[in-house]
Amino acid sequence: MADKKITELTELEAPQSTDVLPIVDLSGTPITKKVEVSNLVTKTLAGLGNVDNVQQMPLSYLDTDGALAANSDTKVPSQKAVKTYADTKVSQGAWTDYSGIATITGWTSYTTKKIAYQVLGSFLYLVYDIQGTSNATAAYFNLPFTVRQTDVVYFPGCAQVIDNGVNQVNAGLVNIEDSGNRFKVYKDMAGAAFTNSGTKRISGWALLPIAP
């Protein structure tokens, strides 16, 4: 083959992994050697030597949807998608009506059913007013967030209690149950149960530490 300048060589537009290139080895006395293309395109030369094939996530796996609508076990949300989702679910200082979402136990029908909350930093500020016909000796509802049960178990958190149509003189006792997910009210500070008939009402507020 006649000597040619590099700029005069025919261009190879689709090199194969077995094609050979000249290369100058500078590890010692400079000497021209040959190298296959497959040995040039390696993870080590690309700076990915400490990453195995499993850890190299395809871009198609990345989910940038801020609503996380796919609800997928195989998609990985981006940082921005997670932040957008969290910001819309936990709006600091904004009131959220929880009345239609909460699972409430202790009534067969309601004349008043109001539960709302705010997230204030790491605290849940809860207000509630539930009144109607009793069908159980218990009165409770599930919380929108898990609270730290070790910090709050029993406390006087019910300002007004009506049992079987009778307005109770003292405040009701609140107990946080079910690993920090249930808000239960007793009709007095001694922890007495309600009557499973007649008009029953619990009304009050609470400031609860949210579990990390």
Image: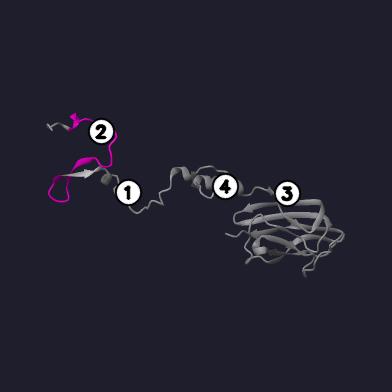
CA gap, disc 3 to disc 4?
A: 23 Å
Q: Quadrant of residue 166?
A: bottom right
Q: Name which of mark 3 and mark 1 comes first in the sequence.
A: 1
CB under 8 Å between discs 3 and 4:
no
CA gap, disc 4 to disc 1?
A: 33 Å
Q: Amino acid at mark 3?
A: Gly
- Residue bearing mark 3: 100
Q: Which mark is residue 71?
A: 4
Q: Which mark is residue 112?
A: none
Point out the image quarter for the N terminus: top left
Residue 89 in the image: above or below residue 123: above
- Secondary structure beneath label 3: loop
- Residue bearing mark 2: 12
CA gap, disc 2 to disc 1?
A: 23 Å
- Secondary structure beneath label 2: loop
Q: Which mark is residue 43?
A: 1
Q: Name which of mark 3 and mark 2 comes first in the sequence.
A: 2
CA gap, disc 3 to disc 1?
A: 54 Å
Q: Position of residue 15 (x, y in %)?
A: 27, 37
Residue 1 falls left or right of residue 35: left
CB under 8 Å between discs 2 and 4:
no
Residue 4 falls left or right of residue 126: left
Disc nearest the viewer among 3 and 4: 4
> Is any part of residue 91 visible from this angle?
no
